[in-house]
Image: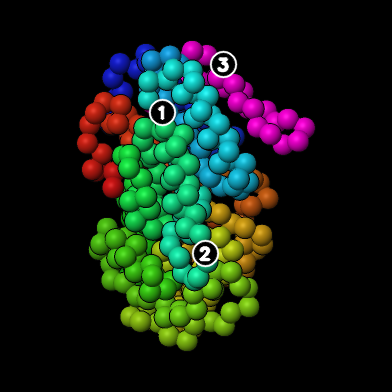
Amino acid sequence: MTEIKDAKNVRLFALNSNEPLAKSVSDKIGLPLSKASISHFADGEIKVTIDESVRGCETYVIQSVSNPVNTNLMELLIMVDALRRASAKKINVVMPYYGYARQDRKARSREPITAKLIANLLEMDNIDRLITINLHAAQVQGFFDIPVDHLQATKLFAKYVQERELGNDIVVVSPDHAGVSLARQFAEEIKAPIAIVDNRNDEVRERTDQEVPEYVIGDVKDKVAIIVDDIVDTGVRMNLSARALQKFGAKKIYGIATHAVLSGNAPRVLEESPLEEMWVTDTINLPAEKEFKKLRRLSVAELLKEAIVRVHNHQSIHALF
């Protein structure tokens, strides 16, 4: 446990999308959330007011760019501008979920690279550092010319799996070939083999009528299969992967995703899937209507607390990667 040093000039701010998580982080650090007012004009314009002095302070703004994505992004950018104009010494953005990270390259002609655009906007807003968790693609770090602390939720999930005592016949499953690196990282943490759902449709996330993949690479028969992904959005890919594993003889199937986007009817899709449980973190605040019986939420508050304290204390955060 790392304790914060000389905290009198540290300020923590929470915007609307991450208020419960931010409150938990502030409690663990032992600092109250600083006061700021966020309001909207009649036409939707956002107004942010910092309600206490931040002159010469090191500030941390906690905000996920999640639904409503564009509103949360603008609130963050305007908050940073307000802090800079109020003479904050340093502005560190803590973005548990980095929205638009899925658009990290040109997959087709005439497409934007929106993850890079978000990086440009944050740097133009003169932030000093970004702290985030499980980027959709690690190379997004390279879009920035400022320090980026890319934290991993792998150990959090690994500890939870070990506490559940699921047995020695666990296999970690990637839902497609692109996710093998993340699956391997988790498999190494819990000392388990990996398998891959041979899903060759790149657009499976966007569709709801896909056939169950016909092949699984690796042995899953009579094993406890844990599907590992960074984001669960529509729930379609997680559902199809679980059905493929069920077809190939897995005796129990669990799902892991760091970021619970859960768009549309994703809760129903996952509830009706072959999954025993769906494990996510609280990087995205979920409204009550997005909760479902199979959902299990783990908190990243301790992870973020450690990162903030170590950054402030000028200590290494290598252990959090």
Most foreground residue, 73 or 135: 73
The amino acid type found where label 2 is placed reads Glu
Q: Earlier in the sequence, mark 3 or mark 1?
A: 3
x and y, in percent, of residue 270 in the image: 58, 65
Separation of marks 3 and 1 at Cα, in angstroms: 16 Å
Dot 2 alpha-carbon crowd within 10 angstroms: few under 14, some 14 to 19, many 20 or more: few
The amino acid type found where label 1 is placed reads Ile
Circle 2 SS class:
loop
Residue hosting label 3: 51
Residue shown at 43%/14% (left/top)?
55
Figure quadrant of residue 37: top right
Circle 3 SS class:
loop
Residue hosting label 2: 111
- Nearer to us: label 3 or label 1: 1
Residue hosting label 1: 91
Circle 1 SS class:
strand
Dot 3 alpha-carbon crowd within 10 angstroms: few under 14, some 14 to 19, many 20 or more: few
Residue shown at 62%/58% (left/top)?
263
Q: Is residue 225 visible?
A: no
x and y, in percent, of residue 15 in the image: 56, 32
Q: Is residue 186 visible?
A: yes
Residue shown at 28%/31% (left/top)?
310
Q: Which residues are magenta?
A: 28-53
Q: Is the residue 162 above or below the residue 23 in the image?
A: below
Verify whether residue 287 appears in magenta. no
Figure quadrant of residue 165: bottom left
Separation of marks 3 and 2 at Cα, in angstroms: 41 Å
Q: Is residue 251 left or right of residue 69?
A: left
